[in-house]
Amino acid sequence: MTHLEKLKAKLGGANPDAVIISSEINQRYISGFPFSDGYLLVTRNRSYLFTDFRYEEAARAEADPGLEVLIPQHAMLDYIADRIFENDCHSVAFEEEALSYSTYEKLKAALPGVKLAPVASAILSSLREIKDEDELKNIAEAQKIADAAFEHIIKFIKPDMTEREVALELEFFMRRHGSGGMPFEIIAVSGSASSMPHGVPRDRKLERGFLTMDFGAKVNGYCSDMTRTVVLGRADAEMKKLYNTVLSAQLAALEMIKEGASRREVDLVARNIIDKAGYEGCFGHKLGHGVGLFIHEEPRLSYTAPEDARLVSGNVVTVEPGIYITGKYGCRIEDLVCVTKDGSVNFTHSPKELIELF
């Protein structure tokens, strides 16, 4: 089934009769076509892509053939309302996380007697959690580009470079090798700045000590995400202990990844290893997150996840424990894995043994 067909199969019954999709990511997921100005309307019978003249030719050529491409000649929301009435829809879901309040008010005024339900984000998220074969292929290819970038950067880094130059070189390499943009701002932080999980690369020379690099590529809109921490200079005994603790925590969590695994327990296995090694309170973020068209999506690997929250085959998640000692240094190791019935497939192939440069 196409993504459009999967969505249509969820409509009716206890669910709304139609869905209005306004976010670019979900529009692309359902239509297969990236555009930034317009809406999708999916009903149980007919489905529409509303946009303007700029996207018309490309939309007719690239969008799912199950969508009728329409170019409104008057107010777009009124045009959408006409199609909702034509299809006898009594309840319509909208993306509560993407539709502005002013647009919601206009839509409500254009649809008297129609129930507007803020449930589309949840419906679409549940579909996007489970990747199909084409999606997995795109994610794997994006991760292949990121792996190649890591292999390149550890040979490219020189002592007189800045953190920003490292980040830029990673981006240039990935774009040159097929990445269609960056899924997020690249992180490259060294020395004392490596204690900041999402630190911003600085225009200053690399500091000796840990260098943490968090980056990813995009293929056909699908993201990859990885982190590697290397040492600039030589690691002392405490740095080696910290690094090996993070690695042990990650490997233990990776062993647990399979269909049916508790998303809470996977996080706690890694967290307990870190705590017992003497770093309690130094792993402040969740263990992992889903990756797809958006870099942070469901499902989450977290100690706060509901007890009944389980991984299912087709989930793609990061596994990224870290230890951060404020003002001193930090380390994170992140792989991107696909959940299968019997275990997982790790899309990340970059080495994880401690690498010392210079």
Image (cartoon, helix red, strand yellow):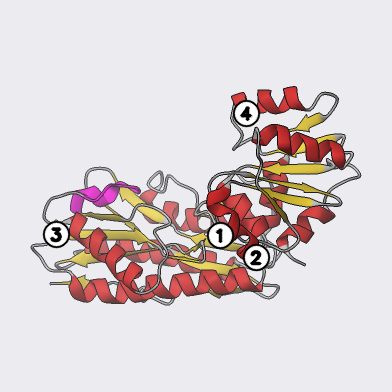
Closer to the chain start, of discs 4 and 3, is 4
Are there few (<14), some (14-19), or many (20+) residues within 10 Å of tag 4? few
Residues drawn in magenta: 191-201
Marks 1,2: beta carbons within 8 A: yes
Closer to the chain start, of discs 1 and 4, is 4
User: Residue 316, percent across and down?
Assistant: 58, 64
Q: Which residue is mark 2?
A: 131
Are there few (<14), some (14-19), or many (20+) residues within 10 Å of tag 1? many
Q: Which residue is mark 4?
A: 103
User: Residue 272, percent across and down?
Assistant: 49, 54
Tell me the tag on residue 292: 1
Q: Which residue is mark 3?
A: 208
- Image vertical order of residue 81 relative to residue 178, above or below: above
Q: CA distance from mark 1 to mark 4?
A: 27 Å
Q: CA distance from mark 1 to mark 3?
A: 35 Å
> Which residue sits furthest front?
73
At mark 3, the secondary structure is: loop
Using residue 346 as the reference point, say whether residue 209 is left or right of it. left
User: Residue 228, percent across and down?
Assistant: 34, 65
